[in-house]
Amino acid sequence: MPTPNRIQRVKDRAFSGPAGNVFRGMATLAAGNIAARLIGIAAIPVLTRLYSPEDFGVLAVLTSLVAILAPIISLRFVLAIPLPRRDGVAINLLVLSTVIMLGMILIASLVFWLFGKQLLGLFSMESLAPHWWLIIFGLIGVGGYEMLSLWATRRRAYKDIAQTTAIQSLIGNLIKLMLGFLAIKPLGLLIGQVLSSGGGVISLWLRFRTDFSSNRRHISIERVLLTAARYRHFVIFRLPSQFFLAFSTQSPLLFFSAVYGAHDTGQLSMALVIIALPLSVIGHSISQAYYAEVAKIGVKDSAQLIKITRIVTRKLFLMSIVPCLILMFGGAYIFDFFFGNKWSVSGSFASLLSIYLIAQFSTSPVMNVFNIINKQGVFLLINMMRAILMVLVFVVVAPYLSLLSYETVLLYSLVMAVFYVCIYLLVISQLEKLRGREGRI
């Protein structure tokens, strides 16, 4: 049994040094994410018995559409909120993002109202057409929560983010369970998902309303326009980058829905949910904390950026090895035991996807470097390449070779593993170039 002194030494090693603030922030955010995910994990074995794979297939399409459209509704100005040194600039960014979001939501509402049945029919999801309004509410929730959580990140209010993450997960899963027991399917899953992704908006707004009120005097149309001009590169580069990123991430489910049907889509979506647990619990937390810390350092100390980036990547890699090996060799048995025998296909999918999970988990947070060093063009090219790879895998190679669903998932996993390794090498390369320029000055 470890002694108190040994435990303290472990804590000192983890939370000291140049990356100490990152890991302290990570620990706080991870606590909320772990609570949220534990709630979700506890609910999944019941949900998989209340709802069918087809119901989860409908949920997957709704979630994918929201994820693909979400980057568009703020034009990605929202990502700049943690960056300005003065709150007056940041509050104008928040206002700008809010106005743009409301306008985009109005346009999306009109499009789905007029053409929702035809659009959803492309993915064999006519059953989702009567519930198109949930896509709109999902966009409002995701967009609003992203803005407010980035303001909280600016304040390093990690505890508030952690609390809202856990609370909205609890509410969303309770709704899913309650409506599932009442046999309201698949609507129960859809409503619960919307609340799980945006239910913390009111709580964060109330928490920071004093901030917003005290900075209201800085808001003006002229300053909003000047802020838009100053951070226009987020629209030029980060918006298409985020769109391509969301498209490439969510397109497997949409392609599966169109080609393999709702049943296989539901199986794949469950596999993706389970393998995303470590990434969403720890990876997302460290990504937020990493972004906050490297934003503070900025480009003034590239050597420190390189050091922190390597430490973070190495620790995440070591943390991922054992869980990924367990999933790789025991996925089908784990899913069959916990979720019921109708989900064994999902377990087999998860085993295949574990191949790229290590690379994704280790490298995803460090992509925030491109915001700091103002390399939005590189980030755009990366996500364009990823989107192209997804089209090649699912639209070109898989149909040409008449691949079965298992073979398509394996191909996807291998391609993505190579992709994430290349991303890390590119990040380090860009930081080394920055350090080289500093050395010549």
Image (cartoon, helix red, strand yellow):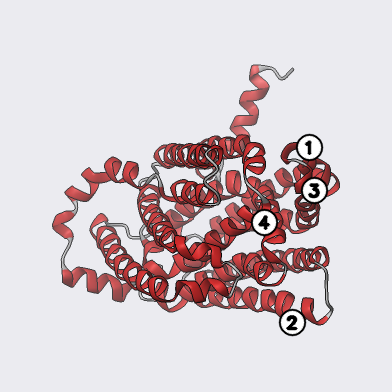
Sequence-wise, which precedes: disc 4 or disc 1?
4
Residue 370 visible? yes
Label 1 residue SS = helix
On screen, residue 220 versus residue 99, left or right, reads left
Q: What number is the disc on residue 190?
A: none
**Residue contact at pointers 3 and 1, CB within 8 angstroms:** no
Kindly identify which residue carries mark 4.
266
Going by the numbered disc 3, the residue's amino acid type is Ser
Sequence-wise, which precedes: disc 3 or disc 4?
4
Label 2 residue SS = helix
Going by the numbered disc 2, the residue's amino acid type is Val
- Image vertical order of residue 137 relative to residue 388, above or below: above
User: Mark 2 or mark 3, which is nearer to you?
Assistant: 3
Q: What number is the disc on residue 396?
A: 2
- Image vertical order of residue 418 relative to residue 271, above or below: below
Disc 2 versus disc 3: distance between alpha carbons?
A: 28 Å
User: Mark 1 or mark 2, which is nearer to you?
Assistant: 1
Sequence-wise, which precedes: disc 2 or disc 4?
4
Picture coordinates of residue 228, whole percent (x, y):
29, 73
Q: Residues within 10 Å of mark 1 (few under 14, many from 20)?
A: few
Label 4 residue SS = helix
Kindly identify which residue carries mark 1.
337
Picture coordinates of residue 273, whole percent (x, y):
64, 50
Going by the numbered disc 1, the residue's amino acid type is Phe
- Image vertical order of residue 52 relative to residue 373, above or below: above
